[in-house]
Image: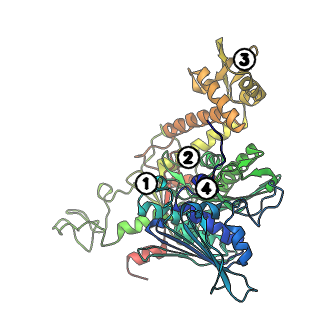
Amino acid sequence: MTIRQLSETLINQIAAGEVIERPASAAKELIENALDAGATRIEIATAGGGKTLLRVTDNGSGMAPAELEMAIRRHCTSKLETDLLDIRTLGFRGEALPSIGSVAKLSLLSRTAEAGEGAEISVTGGKVQPVRPAAANRGTVVEVRDLFFATPARLKFLKSEKAEASAISDVVRRMAIAFPQVRFVLSGSDRTTLEFPATGTDRLARIAQVLGRDFRDNAIEIDAAREDVRLTGFAGVPTFNRGNSLNQFAFVNGRPVQDKLIWSALRAAYAETIPHGRYPVAVLAIDIDPALVDVNVHPAKSDVRFRDPGLVRGLIIGAIREALAREGDRAATTGAAGLMRAFRPETARPAAPWTPSASPYRPFETAGAAPNHFREQQAGFADFATPSARSEPVFPSPAAREEPPPQRHPLGAARAQLHANYIVAQTEDGLVIVDQHAAHERLVFEEMRNALHSRAVPAQALLIPEIVDLSEDDCDRLVAHADEFAKLGLGIERFGPGAVAVRETPAMLGEMDAAGLIRQLADELAEWDTASGLKNKLEYLAATMACHGSVRSGRRMRPEEMNALLRQMEATPGSGQCNHGRPTYIELKLSDIERLFGRS
């Protein structure tokens, strides 16, 4: 076979296959160019899901005619000189425009602030037309038509127009969150417009534009630093979760990224607070020295590599858990919203016809009963004089029998128990409904988890040590963490160059697959340089024990017990949700109740 040099057009088309995967990829590159040019207003117009038309208009610094010719050449950029370790812009390779021009019909119209007129250049399937004068406002207009017309094979693998338009919308949302000082407008062929007005320094206001007002009401601010890394942003309370990960956003030095280390740390931070199959809502921004992160891993620039991944992962987990401990016992406002919807007349079930046994003016009065007396079976209220079952946990009684005014406590004062399962408490400006089993389950679990962390876990010695064969590197990593494992009840030691001996296992786990656990820990250490699998197993067992050892549904509680439970919830981090991620209470404001009765 004869070796020959590929043509420039073919080289660009090959490069385009990596840089421009779909219309959303082209939109991302063009928006990044506009942001690097200092634009404060960016308008994106599409047709056919971006396949037929993609136009990006900005009011940035613009380009001179000579620069237009350079802009469509490969590896020509104004953002990088010699140091690949000091990247402070979104783009830096100089590949986007020539890649797009090789597979589409591309035109650039631009004018600088100093120029009296603009200039335009066109590229069709890699063929460049000369620069020509043109009328233009300050800034740049990049228009891409018939994307992938020069590579029909790639065109066939694109998704539907709706799916491609949705991908472009996702790109715009991520960029809008990263740059709240910029106004974004996205319009499509269906005449719908998505607009994000600039919010300046109010980053939460921009996030609320993208994720909705509910996120603003349920967000916890994150601001933490460790060594040369700073983490800022907002994370939703655990009960404010979603069925997919589309509402998770991460940025590194202002660059939107899809990094598995960040997502793994986010999942770990919300462990034991969100049900399986549900995802937290979070916006995380990492500011780090450019020399400590590599953004040149993939042509799409969505993957990054940190020089110290363990530091970044630990910072994310620690910062979010600290924030949840500080404010995570808040209940999501969406619970109250759902309760309001359930009470609205249009969603309520049709009322049963009035019968002689019930009066519309005395709804709790039944036939044969004395007026104004509530019967427990009909009303569902617990009798406060009924003694509690001594087989269940008993809460300590407060020192004072008289409950302080409700406004002194965030969760208020207990006023009733419904259906022997739900505590109704009065607060200063509303009421709270508490699931007694879910709330106490969380309290018991936190006590057990604190016990696990504050002292060594009891271990059981194996009659015959189990030998686990591993690579030498895995053995080295495991032995380096032997002291950490010993505190959790796992005793290991080196057994030759390629094996470890397991001599003790946590007593809580009983009979277990020690070899499987060791291999799982070795994999975790190789990937993240941290082994949380054993701790997670112990915490999972603690959660199971807490579920079986907490106040059961159906148990009637005395007023002092209910108030003691409320006070413990207020003092326990994360008490807003149980171990399975379900909310432990719902708060309904007085203003909401008044709206139900037409008072406001």
Three-letter code, disc 1 = Lys
Between discs 4 and 2, the one toward the N terminus: 4
Percent from the top left, x then y, of residue 343? 35, 68
Residue 428: in sight, yes or no?
no
Residue hosting label 1: 156
Between discs 2 and 1, the one toward the N terminus: 1
Check whether the beta carbons of the residues at disc 4 and disc 3 lie within 8 A of each other. no
Element type at marker 3?
loop
Residue drawn 77% across and 45% down?
308
Mark 4 Cα-neighbour bin, 10 Å: few <14, some 14–19, many ≥20:
many
In the rendered structure, the answer to whether residue 297 lies left or right of residue 583 reads right
Q: Please, which residue is most extreme toward the left here?
A: 356
Dot in front, 2 or 1: 1
Which one is nearer the viewer's eye here, 217 or 31?
Answer: 31
Residue hosting label 4: 19
Check whether the beta carbons of the residues at disc 2 and disc 1 lie within 8 A of each other. no
Percent from the top left, x then y, of residue 12? 62, 56
Distance Cα–Cα, label 3 vs label 1 = 51 Å
Residue drawn 66% across and 34% down?
524
Percent from the top left, x then y, of residue 500? 71, 18
Dot in front, 4 or 2: 4
Percent from the top left, x then y, of residue 88? 77, 62
Q: In which quarter of the image is the C terminus?
A: bottom left
Residue drawn 74% across and 31% down?
484
Residue hosting label 2: 442
Between discs 3 and 1, the one toward the N terminus: 1
Q: In this view, does 61 lie above or below 571?
A: below
Three-letter code, disc 4 = Val
Three-letter code, disc 3 = Gly
Distance Cα–Cα, label 2 vs label 3 = 42 Å
Three-letter code, disc 2 = Arg
Q: Please, which residue is most extreme toward the bottom here?
A: 116
